[in-house]
Image (cartoon, helix red, strand yellow):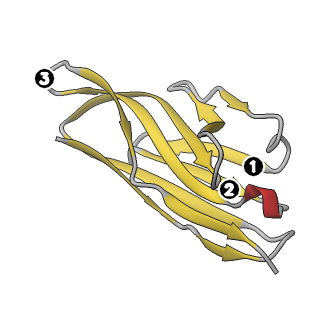
Amino acid sequence: QVQLVESGGGLVQPGGSLGLSCAASGSIKSIYGMNWYRQAPGKEREMVAVIDSAGTTHYSDSVKGRFTISRDNAKNTVYLQMNSLKPEDTAVYYCSAGILDTNSNFANYWGQGTQVTVSS
């Protein structure tokens, strides 16, 4: 059994900062790409940032220069540092990861989501 658990969401004022984390646990053999997505009310889920097992990152144009994705492979954890937050960053943020379990089954797993609200 593999699960992803997110933490760190909340309410922040425009221009502020917030950090998210997502820890994978369970019968894990290897973790490949780790990603952050978000879904705002009435909108489709969109990719925010991705990081592969070598640490190569990619960001959506809307967050480039403001958000930073990182990972700690020893802790099976991915982070998202969000700076200069805007009201349009308000969304439920989800992490996902491609994981090979100890039975050599590969699947993409999702966290439960954490709410980020940017408002004055």
Q: Quick check: marks 3 and 2 in contact, CB under 8 Å?
A: no
Q: Disc 2 on helix, strand or loop?
A: strand
Residue identified by numbered label 1: 67
Q: Is residue 52 above or below residue 10?
A: above
Tell me residue 5's x, y (percent): 37, 55
* Residue 85 in sight in this render: no
Relative to 67, say whether 52 is above or below: above
Q: Position of residue 19 (x, y in %)?
A: 63, 62
Judging by the rendered image, the residue that carries numbered circle 2 is 81
Instruction: State the SS at label 1.
Output: strand
Give the spatial CA distance, label 1 vs label 2: 6 Å
| Whole-percent x, y for residue 66 in the image | 82, 50
In contact (CB < 8 Å): disc 1 and disc 2 = yes
Left or right of 10? Residue 100 is left
Q: Amino acid at mark 1?
A: Phe
Numbered label attached to residue 103: 3
Q: Residue at x 16, y 27 (%)?
A: 102
Give the crowd class for mark 3: few <14, some 14-19, many >=20 residues within 10 Å.
few
Write the residue at 83% across / 61% down: 86
- In the image, what residue type sits under mark 2? Gln
- Residue at 74 percent across and 56 percent down: it is 89
Closer-to-camera residue (73/85) = 85
